[in-house]
Image (cartoon, grey):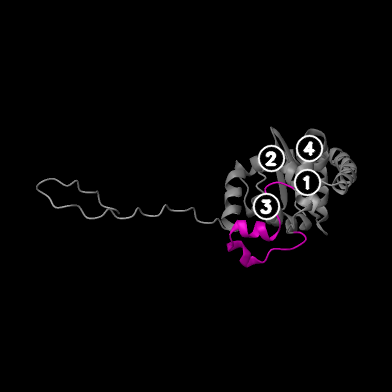
Amino acid sequence: MPTATTIPTPMTAAPAPTPAPAPTPTTAPMTLRAALDRYFAASGFDESSYVDDWVDIPLGPIPVRFPNTADRKRTVPSHDLHHALTGYDATFMGELQIAAWEIGGGMGRHWTGWFLNLTAMSWGAVVRPRTAFRAFVRGRRSHNLYQRPLAPEQMSEDVETVRAERGIKASPAQATGRDYAAYVAYAAVAQVAGAVMLALTPAMIGLGVWGRIKERTRAR
């Protein structure tokens, strides 16, 4: 630590030269693992959703439950990492954005992910069409983890390095006519997925109530 500069007086010698100030500490790069942990802390989620048999999503006081299929378990780890990489949070709006972003980039054979994201896109196209479209275009310019899986050792890499490698920029490039056409096509299909989800909602609420009753029974 630098020592205080001595003020010369008639009874003291001239002070020694003032040492150079210590360099200002810089923020250490955040690893992808740390970014994922921060997302978990902010969202209240954790990796248990990768193995649980059921998915429970409370909509206010209404419990909603559906099976955590093998295909969804295969999809969720990449989905959570996408949240960490894009900065979209786990709020309602954040989920609409990440859904549009993932659809824009393509989801390969992750069929459950396609259905759930198209359902969210059906809401985004109505509630916040411009926001959803920007996320969609951003996804079309990125290389997501469904198309190019992440190597395990990359979890220790700087999150900004991974973003740069995959073209995940803070804002999308200028939209083209093809982007508009693709978005309209996906938004039309999304309305079908949304209608199917609406039809399934009573059954999912029934499963949610059943699950809550079982939990309370076990707690007694």
Question: The residue under label 3 is which amino acid type?
Answer: Asp
Q: Which residue is mark 1?
A: 174
Image coordinates of residue 161 in percent, x first then y, are 62, 60
Q: Could one spot residue 100 in this view of the protein?
A: no
Circle 4 — which element?
A: helix
Circle 3 — which element?
A: helix
What span is in magenta? 146-172
Image coordinates of residue 108 in percent, x first then y, are 82, 59
User: Which of the marked residues, 1 or 3, is nearer the chain's N terminus?
Assistant: 3
Q: What is the quadrant of the N terminus in the image?
A: bottom left
163, 194: nearer the viewer:
163
User: Which of the marked residues, 2 or 1, is nearer the chain's N terminus?
Assistant: 1
193, 60: nearer the viewer:
193
User: Which of the marked residues, 2 or 3, is nearer the chain's N terminus?
Assistant: 3
Question: The residue under label 1 is which amino acid type?
Answer: Gln
- Using the numbered discs, state the Cα–Cα distance from disc 2 to disc 4 in whole angstroms: 37 Å
Label 2 crowd (10 A; few <14 / some 14-19 / many >=20) = some
* In this view, the mark in front (2 or 4): 4
Label 4 crowd (10 A; few <14 / some 14-19 / many >=20) = few
- Which residue is painted at 66% across and 58% down in the image? 164
* In this view, the mark in front (4 or 3): 4
